[in-house]
Amino acid sequence: MHNSIGRLFTVTSFGESHGRCVGAVIDGCPAGLPLDEADIQKDLDRRRAGGSGASTTRLEPDKVEVLSGVSDGFTTGAPICLLVWNRDVSEADYESIRYRLRPGHADFTAHVKYGGFSDWRGGGRFSGRITASFVMAGAIARKLLGTIGVEIIAHTVEIGGIKAKPAGFDEVVKKAAADPLRCADPAASKKMAALIDKAGKEGDSLGGVIEGIARHVPVGLGEPVFDNLDGDLAKALLAIPAVKGVEFGAGFAAARMKGSENNDAFVLRGDRVVTVTNNAGGILGGISSGMPVVVRVAVKPTTSIAGEQATVDIQKMAAASISVGGRHDVCIVPRAVPAVEAMMAVTLADFALRAGLLPGVIR
C-alpha cells in the first residue's frame, strides 16, 4: 500500500474501520502556525454521523488527539501526529459475511492483492471511516492556507438526481453549514431528504454530487506537465472512498460547447487580469489562474445495502446471496463534504509551499 500524499506538505494516513484508531501524520507543516485541537475538532464534528436521516447509526465520538508536532499552541515544524479512537465497533456485523464478497466494495480486489490478509472488518482500510484522517489533515492545511487568504468551502449540489440551484461562495457559507444535507438550496434539500428516507425504507442507497470552491487562490500554483494542479486535485479527491468522477469548471459540459462559449474572456479589473466567466474552473494549463478553483465530484451510492444481491462465497467458491446488515449511511454525500474540502486544502497547501508562497516559519 501507499498511504502518503504530497511533496512538501505530506500526509500519511493510517488506521482501519474497525481497528483501534484512524489517524494521520503531517510532515512539512511550517513552524509557528497557531493550532489547537478545537481547530481540528470543528471539521471532524461536521464529518460525524447523526446530522441527518442519511447517516449511519454508528456514532463515534471522534475526539481528536494531537500526539506530536504542537507545543504551547503552535506547530513546531516537527511531524504532527493526529488520531481518533474507534469506540463503536461491531465485528459481529461482518463475521457472518466475511467470505461473501459485498458487491461494489473492495472485498474481492483487496483479498486478491493482499493474499487474504487485508482487514475484512467493515472494509478495513477501504472504508469511508479513513476519511476522518483526511479531515484532520485538511483542518491544518486549511488554517495554513488562511495565512495567505485562501478560503475553501464545499456543498451538496445533487442527491439522487435532485439538483440544487447554483450558489456562490458567500451563499454556500451562509446556508450549507446549517443544512443537515450540507445543501445551500433549502427547497432541494427537503426533496433530497424525502428521497433518502424512501431509499432507506426500501433497503437501498443514493449517491450524488459535491461541489468544492477555493477562492483567493494565488496565480501560479501547479507544476506542469505531470504535477498539474487539476491532476493532483483529482488524485486527492479520488482517494475519498465512493468518489467515482471529478470535473473542473464546466467539466463534461464543455464537450457540448463551442469554443466561443467555453473560452473565458480576459478583462482588467483594476490592476488584475481576470476572466468574465470561469468555465476553466480556475485552472489553465494545469496552473491556477487566480479565479476560484471550482471542482465537482461524483459520489456513488453507498454500496452496503440491505437488499439481497448475488455474489460469490470465496471460501466455498460457490454462488451465494448477500444482504448487508450492520450500520451504514443511506447516502454518504453529506458526510463527504468536509472530506472534499480537506483534500482540496491538503493539495493547495502542498502547491503553495512548492511555489514558495508559505515560509518555513509563520510569524
Image (tube, grey):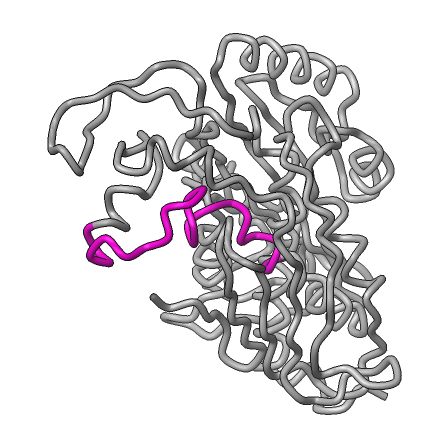
Is 183 located above or below residue 133 in the figure? above
Q: How many marks?
A: 0
Q: Residue at x 76, y 58 (%)?
A: 151
Residue 94 against residue 32 in the figure, above or below: above
| Residue 131 lies in the magenta stretch | yes
Q: Residue at x 58, y 59 (%)?
A: 21
Q: Is residue 216 visible?
A: no
Residue 5 lies, in percent from the top left, at 48, 70
x%, y% of residue 114? Answer: 24, 58
Q: Residue at x 67, y 48 (%)?
A: 338
Q: Is residue 287 magenta?
A: no
Q: Quadrant of residue 125?
A: bottom left
**Which quadrant would residue 143 be assigned to in this image?**
bottom right
Q: Is residue 295 visible?
A: yes
For the stretch drawn in magenta, the main secondary structure is helix
* Above or below 206: residue 125: below
Q: Is residue 142 above or below residue 296?
A: below
Q: Quadrant of the C terminus?
A: bottom right
Q: Nearer the viewer, residue 24 or 264?
A: 24
Residue 333, given in percent of the width and then of the height, sits at 59, 34
- Give, as a single range, the part of the protein colored magenta: 112-134
Q: Position of residue 75 (x, y in %)?
A: 77, 83
